[in-house]
């Protein structure tokens, strides 16, 4: 496995995790990469490492260019172990390397994870000369951990962006002009929706901080890097961090004996009749991370659950817990479902939608046992009247 040249004397030396299908619950249908970069200058610098277990791939790629013992600096942009897991391994193979991390949180986090190593903390705005090149550190706290930072090299006009602008996408291609752009943008949106959604304010601050910087390449921490479509991904981040929604609807449900399912179908069709594109997600057949990607930019959300043991179905509860944690904004929502007796689930769903920050746009729709044709027609009219 070899290094891939990004610019003269700047190489991608990361690892490709082709088989990853769950990143702590985020379904990674296309796998992932852990991107690391090697800069050959008077001071040889490695930007980030890889997830634990992938260190041999990192070492092999570095060794295709240079003896790893010659590395002077290891920049650790982010303590989360998908980037820093290889720090102790690399510290052993690079005995002269200083590990650069943000102050105070990067230093605290790395020490907590890996004990005492040769760390050097840097503050927001600090720079490091590595010879012909300078590395400027821009801290991006809570984007998405307290320690997060990005690194800009003005001589090369490269932003090493770590998690920002990345995607979980295993590929032998490294750049946005080597691969199907809509697919990469979809994966970037999925990454934002499932990892960065709660931090829109911090993303806006980071975008502002980067706005005066001349960027010719964004070397991401995951997936594909950007060089030909930088305005596209910046425009997406501007939109996503502002929580802009479109006139679209998402219908999410689980069902026991098809009554709630029939209601979900009717609601989906009613949105279509109203002129609003709608997507339909049965929680038994779909992944939360995919559903969330659609919800993120859709104005309307309908969530259905039958009542089981006086509760909503556990699949619906898990979905609502995930939704609430991601702190969505600007959604109009309502609850629906069928029940045999009791019927508590629909009210519970509505309560959780409110707790997740959604505005209730239609009173909860409940039906005993099986919805009649007439009841389904009423649902259609109610949805069309929203
Ligand atoms: Fe890719 Fe927050 O780690």
Image: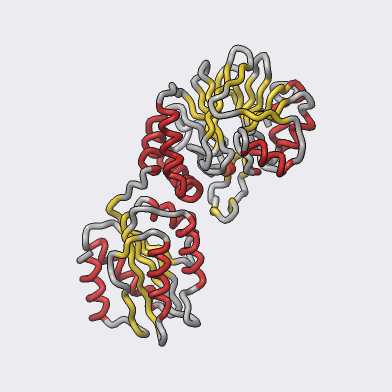
Can you tell me which quadrant of the image ligand 1 is in?
top right
Relative height, residue 236 to residue 280 (above, below): above
The residue shown at (60%, 38%) is 78
How is this picture coloured?
secondary structure
- Taking the image as shown, residue 348 lies to the left or right of residue 143, namely left
Depth check: give the residue in front, 373 or 153. 153
Name the foreground residue: 1 vs 334: 334
Q: Taking 167 as reference, is 357 left or right?
A: left
Residue 341 is drawn in which quadrant? bottom left
Q: Quadrant of residue 59?
A: top right
Q: Check the image and report above or below for 329 versus 85.
A: below
Which quadrant holds the N terminus? top right
The percent position of residue 371, horizontal first and vertical second, equals 31, 81
On the question of residue 174 being in view, the answer is no
Q: Nearer the viewer, residue 206 or 183?
A: 206
Which residue is the extreme one toward the top? 132
Instruction: Estimate the x, y position of residue 373 in percent, counting from the top left.
Output: 25, 80
Question: Which residue is depicted at the point 53% across and 29% down?
Answer: 138
Would you place residue 289 above or below residue 377 in this image? above
x, y percent for residue 302: 35, 65
**Which quarter of the rendering shows the C terminus?**
bottom left
| Residue farthest to the bottom, as pictured | 341
The structure residue drawn at horizontal position 46% and vertical position 66%, both measured from the top left corner, is 283
- Where on the picture, by quarter, is residue 2? top right
- Picture residue at 21% right of the left edge, 71% below the top: 381
How far from the left and from the top, in percent, is residue 23?
59, 51
Residue 85 visible? The answer is yes
Total marks placed: 0
Residue 296 sits above or below residue 166 on the image: below
């Amino acid at each position: 496995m070899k290094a891939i040249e990004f610019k003269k004397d700047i190489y991608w030396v990361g690892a490709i995790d082709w088989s990853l299908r769950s990143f702590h619950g985020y379904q990674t249908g296309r796998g992932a990469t852990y991107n690391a970069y090697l800069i050959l200058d008077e001071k040889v610098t490695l930007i980030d490492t890889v997830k634990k277990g992938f260190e041999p791939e990192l070492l092999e790629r570095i060794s295709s260019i240079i003896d790893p013992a010659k590395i002077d600096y290891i920049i650790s942009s982010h303590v989360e172990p998908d980037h820093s897991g290889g720090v102790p391994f690399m510290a052993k193979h690079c005995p002269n390397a200083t590990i650069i991390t943000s102050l105070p949180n990067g230093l605290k986090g790395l020490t907590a994870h890996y004990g005492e190593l040769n760390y050097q903390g840097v503050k927001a705005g600090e720079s490091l000369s590595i010879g012909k090149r300078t590395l400027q550190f821009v801290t991006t706290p809570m984007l998405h951990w307290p320690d997060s930072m990005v690194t800009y090299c003005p001589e090369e006009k490269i932003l090493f962006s770590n998690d920002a602008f990345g995607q979980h996408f295993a590929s032998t291609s490294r750049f946005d002009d080597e691969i199907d752009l809509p697919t990469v943008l979809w994966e970037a949106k999925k990454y934002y929706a499932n990892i960065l959604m709660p931090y829109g304010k911090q993303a806006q601050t980071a975008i502002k901080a980067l706005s005066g910087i001349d960027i010719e390449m964004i070397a991401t921490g995951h997936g594909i890097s950007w060089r030909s479509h930088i305005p596209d991904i910046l425009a997406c981040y501007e939109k996503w961090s502002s929580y802009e929604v479109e006139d679209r609807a998402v219908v999410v449900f689980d069902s026991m004996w098809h009554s709630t399912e029939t209601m979900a179908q009717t609601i989906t069709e009613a949105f279509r009749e109203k002129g609003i594109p709608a997507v339909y997600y049965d929680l038994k057949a779909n992944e939360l991370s995919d559903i969330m990607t659609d919800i993120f930019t859709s104005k309307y959300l309908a969530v259905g659950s039958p009542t089981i043991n006086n509760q909503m179905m556990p699949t619906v509860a898990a979905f609502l817990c995930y939704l609430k944690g991601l702190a969505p904004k600007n959604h109009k929502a309502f609850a629906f479902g069928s029940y045999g007796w009791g019927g508590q689930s629909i009210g519970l769903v509505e309560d959780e939608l409110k707790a997740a920050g959604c505005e209730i746009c239609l009173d909860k729709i409940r039906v005993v046992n099986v919805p009649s044709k007439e009841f389904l027609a009423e649902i259609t009219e109610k949805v069309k009247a929203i």
